[in-house]
Amino acid sequence: MSTAASNDTAATANGSASGPGLIPATILTGFLGSGKTTLLKRVLTEAHGQKIAVIENEFGEENIDNDILVSDTQEQIIQLSNGCVCCTIREDLRTTLTDLARRRRTGELDFERVVIETTGLADPGPVAQTFFMDDEIAETFLLDSILTLVDAKHAGEQLDTRQEARRQVGFADQIFLSKTDLVDAAAVDALTHRLKHMNPRAPQRRVHFGEVPISEVFDLRGFNLNAKLEIDPEFLSVDEHDHGHDHDHAHDHAHHGHDHDDHAGHDHAPGEACNHPHHHHHDDDVKSFVFRSDRPFNPAKLEDFLGAIVQVYGPKMLRYKGVLNMKGTDKKVIFQGVHQLMGSDLGPKWSPDEARISKLVFIGIDLPKDILLQGLEGCLA
Ligand SMILES: Nc1nc2c(ncn2[C@@H]2O[C@H](COP(=O)(O)OP(=O)(O)OP(=O)(O)O)[C@@H](O)[C@H]2O)c(=O)[nH]1
């Protein structure tokens, strides 16, 4: 069972966490061997002048499932980059973070941000939730984003067979594709497409042996309520009809391929045989869908509905995020959540010439799309 499922905390508003003085934290995740350490090393080398505390999670799979982030068999290495300080402690993540913050306050340690590299088998959900469930952590740290490395060579099989790999994609605020040098362009395209269906809101970027500008790694504010939503509207309109049926390896490729190709811009006549790798369909359990409406929400109804929904489906709701048109305010309401924890924040005003369209994307495991869409429809004013 996933650790996330054991979290039965009631929905909690987390508000905006972007105040000054908060220490930004980045979660670096990705399946075994996907290139996390390679990327981190590059970033630490490139980040001259920045002091970065790195928390390496070397947790066994059993520990992850039994007790979130407590390791009793292996060391947790907290290491500060740029040759500052290295120390080793054996604690859970919360204690580790609290301790880091305390030592920073007392001047014992000096760092500007924290990177947590999770093990390749970790579900990043509980790691992310640590930042919202503990007041002291929430007052000290700001979860900047979850970065997910995806190994272009092995992701196909990993996503087919490993739920952790799919969850890592579902949680991502930013996806980095590694090892694209080992596969052909069509395979990369197919993977990109698949990942986008699983998580339409995470931008994807190829990285060759971790080479990525530091500006694309830090201060993304991907997890932040006032961050802008990165959803490609065109993609999602394709997604709507594309996901109305089960994907199946046995499907007629030419038929389905046509839908995909319309979107991907690869033209071929309907029914024409096509061996483009897009046409290997996957029944990924991590899926996404979008709610959209030009009618405003009734805030009380919406709160009741979502509160009830997360009680039931929270463990399956990896990420949900949206910009809402709420009755009673002329500001955008930015809403997001992870599992049972959700929060909202007032964003900028709708501009006079802008259509006030609510958009809410859900990324989760076998989510009851119809129940959610109909329920949300019922919350409109
Ligand atoms: N060809 C190729 N190899 C890469 C690339 N990025 C990383 N690698 C190699 O992939 C292997 C695994 O990389 P790591 O950075 O150790 O992966 P990791 O995600 O930290 O691995 P775990 O800690 O085991 O989960 C290493 O041999 C890297 O050199 C890439 O873009 N192309």
Image (spheres, rainbow, N blue to C red):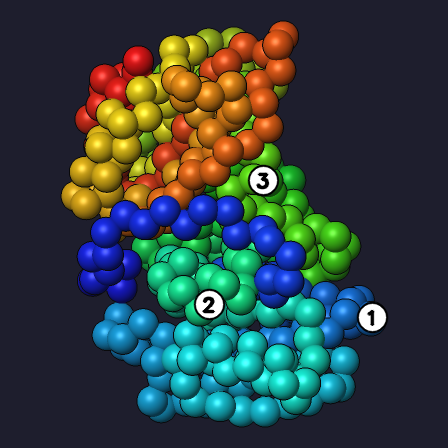
Q: Decide: few, some or many residues near mark 1? Use Cα within 10 Å; few <14, some 14-19, many ≥20.
A: few
Query: Which of the two labelled residues, at mark 3 and mark 1, occupies the earlier sequence position?
Result: 1
Q: Quadrant of residue 353?
A: top right
Q: Image point 22% across, 31% down: which residue?
A: 305
148 lies left or right of 184: left
Closer mark to the observer between disc 2 and disc 3: 2
40 lies left or right of 343: right
Q: Image point 64% across, 62% down: which residue?
A: 21
Q: Decide: few, some or many residues near mark 3? Use Cα within 10 Å; few <14, some 14-19, many ≥20.
A: few
Q: Image point 42% across, 74% down: which residue?
A: 94
Tell me the tag on residue 48.
Answer: 1
Q: Nearer the viewer, residue 337 or 71?
A: 337
125 lies left or right of 245: right
Q: Is mark 3 within 8 Å of ligand 1?
A: no
The secondary element bearing badge 3 is classed as: loop
Q: Residue 334: image x %, image y %? A: 48, 33
Tell me the tag on residue 137.
Answer: 2
- Whether tag 3 and tag 1 are in contact, CB under 8 A, the answer is no
- Residue with the mark numbered 3: 227
* Amino acid on which the number 2 mark rests in the picture: Ile
Instruction: Say above or below: 14 vs 203.
Output: below
